[in-house]
Image (spheres, coloured by chain):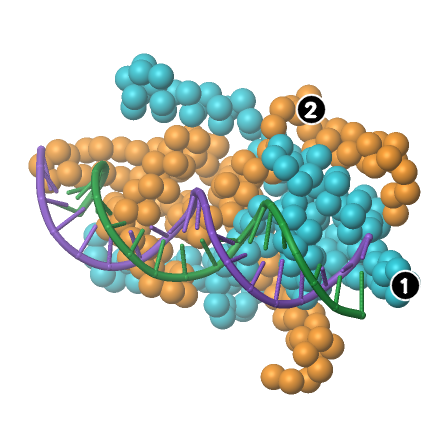
Chain colours: A orange, B cyan, C green, D purple
DNA sequence: CAGCATCCTCGGCGATACTG
DNA sequence: CAGTATCGCCGAGGATGCTG
């Protein structure tokens, strides 16, 4: 536990150093990370793109079937693909113009990120039982076996 | 690229199998993952808790200083800590009642998750230059050197 | 069929005030 | 000082309709 102003500052400095690792200390990579992994569809999109190259319509269907809820709206899909493309994780290939034929795939950087995401998802999946047990325990302790 | 209904279904099946990895196939761990990593403060909280045990007031200050924006509101901090505790990632220790003395720390499971988060953040930090380059390239290509 | 514009909903988060 | 309750904002994301 922290007790003094100086200790707090020291902790902050240590953490900043830890988070920066190689001299990249300007604004937190945490926000960038959450922007990447944190939204509803990007991780799923990365996962799907990792297997092959897709047309937008196919992406929508697969993503919709993969997620427990309904399909992604194509507006959001376009948005997310654009964002991912901008960060350099997905590559867009336009082949035909009439009718439009566009396919999406991962870049090298995107493939790395996809592995990260995949690892993360697997970790959660493997710990699922422990997490659910913790939840049940917490609920029992707090809501006093109501519900 | 997918061409037929059957191919789509096969892809979905393959992905589902990949995502499940060990027989954990019931509802997507992706949502659980994003719920863990995706929000504004949880990753930061995990990172900070990994170093020691903290009082709520200290947590607020450190988190506030770490994030580029202002302090976390103590309402949200309590919310996030409760959520993390419920999932079994943080442990709450109440020592005094008058005045209240409560400290927070990581559980074993939480320590594992913290490592995951930390790894992720480091990955992004190390790739920061490439990402920024990609962004610049994209913007130049799309907004035709305006801005 | 890819992409964009418009409108609307909803949940995460912040600010403030209050209790023990 | 820990925790809760109330209110209000804002942005992510859904629905629909139109263009090339």
Note whether B70 is above or below A27 in the view shown: below
Q: Quadrant of residue B82?
A: bottom right
Note whether B29 is above or below A7 in the view shown: below
Q: Quadrant of residue B105?
A: bottom right
Front of the two marks 1 and 2:
1
Instruction: From the viewer's side, name the closer residue of A80 and B146.
Output: B146
**Number of other residues with Cα within 10 Å of mark 1, as a class: few under 14, some 14 to 19, many 20 or more:** few
User: Horizontal placement of B93 versus A57: left or right?
Assistant: right
Instruction: From the viewer's side, name the closer residue of C13 and B84.
Output: C13
Q: Label 1 belongs to which residue? A: B98
**Residue occupying the point 68% across, 21% down:** A23
Q: Secondary structure at mark 1?
A: loop
Outermost residue, bottom side: A146
Note whether B135 is above or below A34 in the view shown: above
Chain at tag 2: A
User: Horizontal placement of B17 versus A31: left or right?
Assistant: left
Q: Position of residue A59 (x, y in %)?
A: 30, 50
Q: CA distance from mark 1 to mark 2?
A: 45 Å
Instruction: From the viewer's side, name the closer residue of A45 and A12.
Output: A12
**Residue occupying the point 38% across, 45% down:** A49
Q: Quadrant of the C terminus of chain B?
A: top left
Instruction: From the viewer's side, name the closer residue of A68 and B94.
Output: B94
Q: Position of residue B131 (x, y in %)?
A: 49, 27
Q: Is residue B123 visible?
A: no
Q: Secondary structure at mark 2?
A: loop
Q: Label 2 belongs to which residue? A: A22
**Residue occupying the point 60% across, 59% down:** A124
**Number of other residues with Cα within 10 Å of mark 2, as a class: few under 14, some 14 to 19, many 20 or more:** few
Note whether A86 is above or below A80 in the view shown: above
Chain at tag 1: B
């Amino acid at each position: 536990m922290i007790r003094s102003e100086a200790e707090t500052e020291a902790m902050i400095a240590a953490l900043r150093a830890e988070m920066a690792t190689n001299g990249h200390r300007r604004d937190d990579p945490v926000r960038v990370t959450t922007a990447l992994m944190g939204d509803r569809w990007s991780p799923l999109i990365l996962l799907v793109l990792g297997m092959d190259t897709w047309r937008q319509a196919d992406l929508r269907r697969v993503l919709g079937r993969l997620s427990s809820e309904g399909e992604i709206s194509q507006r959001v899909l376009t948005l997310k693909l654009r964002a991912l493309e901008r960060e350099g994780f997905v590559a867009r290939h336009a082949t035909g113009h009439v009718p439009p034929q566009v396919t999406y795939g991962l870049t090298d950087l995107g493939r790395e990120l996809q592995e990260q995401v995949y690892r993360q998802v697997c970790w959660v999946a493997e710990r699922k039982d422990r997490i659910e047990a913790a939840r049940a325990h917490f609920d029992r302790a707090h809501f006093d076996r109501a519900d």
